Image (spheres, rainbow, N blue to C red):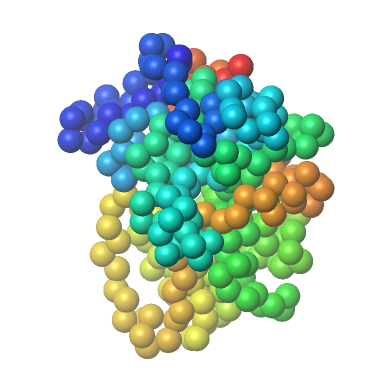
Amino acid sequence: MRALVLKSSSSAESANRVAFRQDYPIPVPPAGESLVRVRMAGICGTDLEMVQGYMDFSGVLGHEFVGEVVQTANRALAGRRVVGEINAACGRCEWCQAEMGRHCPNRTVLGILGRDGAFAEYLCLPDANLIPVSDKLPDEAAVFAEPLAAGFEILEQTRIAPADRIAILGDGRLGAIIALALKARGLKPVIGGHHDEKLQRLHEMGIAGQDESTLEPGFDIVVDCTGSAQGLSRALELVRPRGRLVLKTTVAGSAGINLAPVVINEIEIIGSRCGRMLPALRALETGLVDPQPLVCAVFPLTEAEVALGRASDRSVFKVLLKAF
Ligand SMILES: [Zn+2]
Ligand SMILES: [Zn+2]
């Protein structure tokens, strides 16, 4: 099958770590898993960081997808269009028993850790991870279920009141989808960014945004989506004493940052990763969240390398791959 494959950082120079292949073997689903034919996949910042060496992953990249179940022992899934929870947990450990499989120490993660991902014609996931999608929801929206779930995750981790002042640092695809998630729950975040055309697009989607340098300190909650070490320092300047700082980006380089303000101002730092897929999918299906204006380009899978390059352009939001 066709697939965009990443080689381990120990085995290749970063310039030629990514290769598009025509001859990658179609995965064979083990018991309890299904084979999914990928329809559409989304490129996210994590994919770009992984090309730079984050997670030292080797295999097929990609974890945001919508596809069709083409081989399964599970009748409820056969032939269905699905999205998928990306963390495949062991189901036996204490984390799994406590329904926190996303933290299972034995987990594999689609396109990120020990499991081939979605920038390919086919992928495998456990049946329990697959969620059927309503026929009415277009692929271009369903493919956002995973990043939207990561946005809603913040609201599962910390209570945010309607009057809380919230800043999201970073006007990229992640900041935008988090803003949509918070807006869907009646909150009014302001995005601090650096790109006029993206801030304008967000404005058209009903999301307040301004140049990051013009934000004034005093926010109750600051969500860092900058993907840069400087972003974290800036977030610490903007959050009020006893405020909360939500870290949403994993940066390939280490930050080297002065944490004294965290102590002096008694800042609560919340690390935040993936969230539950079902509420995100329902928000898309009901139209509570429409992320489609964030789609800047759709490339065929065969042009996956070009698409990755386009996605690393700071002026674009979402770049999608169409597998068939
Ligand atoms: Zn992602
Ligand atoms: Zn487990």
Q: Is residue 266 left or right of residue 162?
A: left
Q: How many marks?
A: 0
Which residue is pictured at 47% across the width and 53% down the height?
91
Say if 285 sits above or below 138 in the image.
Answer: below
Please say whether residue 322 is visible from this viewpoint: no
Residue 283, x across and y down, in percent: 74, 51
Residue 115, x across and y down, in percent: 39, 36
Residue 72, x across and y down, in percent: 59, 27
Which residue is pictured at 76% across the width and 54% down the height?
206
Quarter in which the N terminus is drawn = top left
Q: Residue furthest top?
A: 22
Q: Quadrant of residue 129?
A: top right
Q: Residue furthest left?
A: 10
Q: Quadrant of residue 27?
A: top left
Which residue is pictured at 47% across the width and 28% down the height?
29
Q: Is residue 151 left or right of residue 28?
A: right
Say if 171 sits above or below 53 in the image.
Answer: below
Which residue is pictured at 70% across the width and 47% down the height?
281
Quarter in which the C terminus is drawn = top right
Q: Nearer the viewer, residue 71 or 114?
A: 71
Say if 314 sits above or below 186 in the image.
Answer: above
Please say whether residue 189 is visible from this viewpoint: yes
Say if 164 sits above or below 211 in the image.
Answer: below
Residue 99, x across and y down, in percent: 53, 61
Q: Is residue 110 left or right of residue 191?
A: left
